[in-house]
Amino acid sequence: MRFTRTALFASAFLGLLVLAGWKVADSPGKQLQTFADSFLSTLDADQKSVAVMAYDSPKRVDWHFIPKKSRKGLVLSEMNAAQRTAALRLVRAALSEAGYDKASKIMQLEAVLRELEGEKRNWARDPDKYYLTIFGTPSSTDAWALSFEGHHLSLNFACRGGALVDSTPQFFAANPGTIMNDVSGPLGKGTRVLIEEEDLAFELVNSLSDSQSERAIISPKALKEIRFAGEAQAVVGEPEGIPQSGLNAKQKANLEKLVAVYVNAVTEDVAKQRRELIAEDGWENVHFAWAGATEPGIGHYYRIRGRRFLIEFANTQADAAGNPANHIHCVWRDLSGDFDLPNK
């Protein structure tokens, strides 16, 4: 019953935005403030004491995507229907339609995991076990922030001066990467939540010439995991792989299309800012690096590095049914500083 309730709320609440008087013309920062205030107004005092933390709390930068018994913030399962709708409406205001669809389906994958793992599973696998936290007081002047997190999902946003100024770390994952078994619920066999993140990268790496591959492939074996998982900042060295300037026209277009999948997960105004920063830094300075197999079902990894952004993707683990390399982790990081903090 809980899974059905979550799926219904995740897919149906968009229509409520109109009823709630959502002003599309408002800036992302204003929209987040409006919906954060609306969400907070539905909570009682005890719930607010859990959902709201100080802006400078160390927990603001304490993020991770692994399963946990508990997390910072107020969990969806302890909200009533109105509160859950308000919480999801707030998250939706920070994301694009594509980004929210991914987040919703990642939550629904918990029910798939519950079914595949059976009664001997180690974790509850609850689609309602996602936590919303507000740091500080939503304001058009002061700094405040928002986190929405659970297994395989971590979304973090910071506002300052009424503007949405940071939207990282942005983490999505999928287990199974491809649902290969017959399962109940809306996500049926063949579902691939992160299909573009994987297929576009395969298309790019397999289009490389031998000389290009020598530059792009940094290891015959995939990295087991994305780097800097759970760390407040991604501290990187020199870029590896092949620069965009070393690609032909079709490959350059493919690389830009792949980067756009990550860029466009957030609301359009913020995605536009990301695109402008990449253009300002120069696409020729963007590097593509690959490690591992260049075909599905065998461990593979890639990273895309710009001067102020980092994308990492790893698919090396088996899924819950034992199918190899069918468990995806991928992330977008702000190299100038996640959480609206300087990357020292």
Image (tube, rainbow, N blue to C red):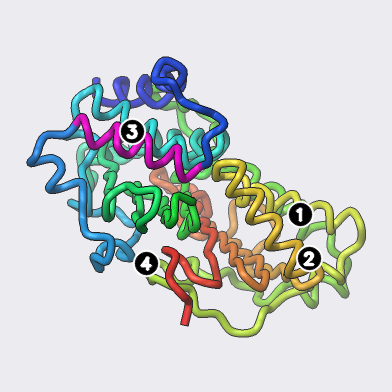
Q: Are marks 2 and 1 in contact (CB under 8 Å)?
A: yes
Q: Give neighbour class at mark 1: few <14, some 14-19, many 20+ (Cα, 10 Å).
A: some
Q: Residues within 10 Å of mark 4 (few under 14, many from 20)?
A: some
Numbered range of the magenta stretch: 28-42
Q: Is residue 30 magenta?
A: yes
Which residue lies under the disc numbered 2? Answer: 283
Neighbours of disc 2 within 10 Å: few (<14), some (14-19), many (20+): some
Q: Is residue 324 magenta?
A: no
Q: Label 3, label 4: how many angstroms apart (C-alpha)? A: 24 Å
**Depth order, front residue of 331/302:** 331
Give the mark nearest the N terminus, 2 or 1: 1
Going 64% across and 69% down the picture, which residue do you hit? 291
Mark 3 sits on what residue?
Answer: 111
The image shows residue 16 at horizontal and vertical percentages of 41, 18
SS state under label 3:
helix
Asked whether 31 or 65 is in front, the reply is: 31
Asked if residue 219 lies left or right of residue 344, the reply is right
Earlier residue among tags 2 and 4: 4
Query: What residue is drawn where x is 55% and y is 71%?
Result: 335
Alpha carbon of mark 3 to alpha carbon of mark 1: how far? 34 Å
226 sits to left or right of 41:
right
Q: Earlier in the sequence, mark 3 or mark 4?
A: 3
**Whether residue 286 is situated above or below residue 21 in the rendered picture:** below
| Proximity of marks 2 and 4: CB atoms separated by less than 8 Å | no
Disc number placed over residue 230 in the picture, else none: 4
List x then y, in percent, for residue 55: 28, 61
Instruction: Name the main secondary structure of what is drawn in magenta.
Output: helix
Q: Nearer the viewer, mark 2 or mark 4?
A: 2
Residue 256 is labelled as: 1
